């Protein structure tokens, strides 16, 4: 190949290569660039070092004597028609509400929890309506647990209640829950410190906390219709447990 021709071919090839490189550079500049980030840079530790952490749990239980009673009280009435059953029930419940108020229970703490009117059927299974029954239940709050027995006697014996039950609780449960939660967190920290020491590492900052709260109420007392008695009703109050469990995650320093 003559020298002049060879020089022309080399010059053309070099120009083509330069154009191709320039085109690739433009394409690369117009497309997003994806970088693979090392896993050590994705971490909860502010230093950027990968830290799997340490996870533990803790429990705290506080026992408190209940300071409030929740009374559920009601009555039923029967008649040949639904209207008469309602009227008979209204007379009973008016007397019952009046008795509750005379005991010192304010209107704001007397709430209707249930009301029903319905037919009664013959026991032969034929579906014959023999009359109607109306019933109503009230929820009351009694703030002196030591005298709740006297309140029950009055509601049954003078108020005409035929259904009554009582349970106990705390007027301010959040304070007891906060106390139990502090104990649970302290328990979790002690466990984490022991685990870190056994593993030969140092415990870092808290990364995550979750908790759950459980309240174990004392037993509920139920009274059958016509529970009037010569002696005064006595209700042992006992105590109730408030339990908080937490789960905590710590960094490893």
Image (spheres, grey):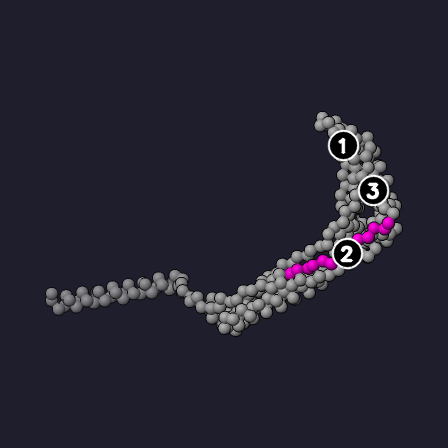
Asked whether 215 falls inside the magenta stretch, the response is no
Q: Main secondary structure of the magenta part?
A: loop
Question: Under tag 2, what secondary structure?
Answer: loop
Mark 2 to mark 3: distance in Å?
A: 23 Å
Residue at the (74%, 50%) spot, across then down: 220
Image coords of residue 171 (percent x, y): 76, 58
Q: Nearer the viewer, residue 31 or 237?
A: 237
Name the N-terminal-most of marks 1 and 2: 1
What span is colored magenta in the figure? 231-244
Residue at the (77%, 47%) spot, across then down: 222
Residue at the (76%, 39%) spot, across then down: 116
Q: Quadrant of residue 6?
A: bottom left
Which quarter of the figure is the N terminus placed in? bottom left
Q: Nearer the viewer, residue 226 or 42?
A: 226
Disc number for residue 145: none
Q: Which residue position is annotated with label 1?
A: 120
Disc number for residue 237: 2
């Amino acid at each position: 190949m003559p020298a002049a021709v060879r020089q022309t071919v080399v010059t053309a090839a070099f120009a083509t290569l330069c154009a191709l490189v320039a085109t690739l550079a433009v394409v690369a500049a117009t497309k997003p660039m994806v970088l693979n980030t090392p896993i050590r840079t994705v971490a909860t530790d502010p230093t950027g070092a990968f830290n799997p952490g340490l996870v533990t749990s803790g429990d705290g239980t506080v026992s408190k004597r209940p300071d409030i009673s929740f009374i559920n009280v009601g009555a039923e009435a029967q008649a040949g028609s639904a209207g008469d059953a309602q009227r008979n029930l209204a007379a009973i419940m008016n007397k019952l509400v009046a008795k509750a108020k005379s005991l010192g229970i304010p209107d704001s703490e007397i709430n209707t929890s249930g009301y029903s009117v319905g037919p009664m059927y013959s026991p032969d299974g034929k579906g014959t309506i023999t009359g109607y029954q109306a019933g109503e239940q009230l929820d009351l709050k009694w703030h002196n647990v030591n005298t709740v027995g006297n309140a029950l006697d009055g509601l049954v014996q003078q108020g005409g209640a035929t259904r009554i039950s009582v349970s106990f609780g705390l007027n301010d449960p959040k304070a007891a829950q906060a106390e139990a939660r502090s104990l649970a967190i302290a328990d979790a920290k002690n466990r984490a410190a022991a685990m870190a020491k056994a593993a030969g590492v140092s415990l870092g900052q808290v990364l995550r906390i979750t908790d759950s709260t459980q309240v174990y109420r004392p037993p509920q007392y139920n009274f059958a219709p016509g529970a009037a008695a010569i002696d005064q009703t006595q209700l042992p109050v006992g105590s109730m447990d408030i339990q908080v469990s937490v789960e905590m995650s710590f960094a490893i320093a």
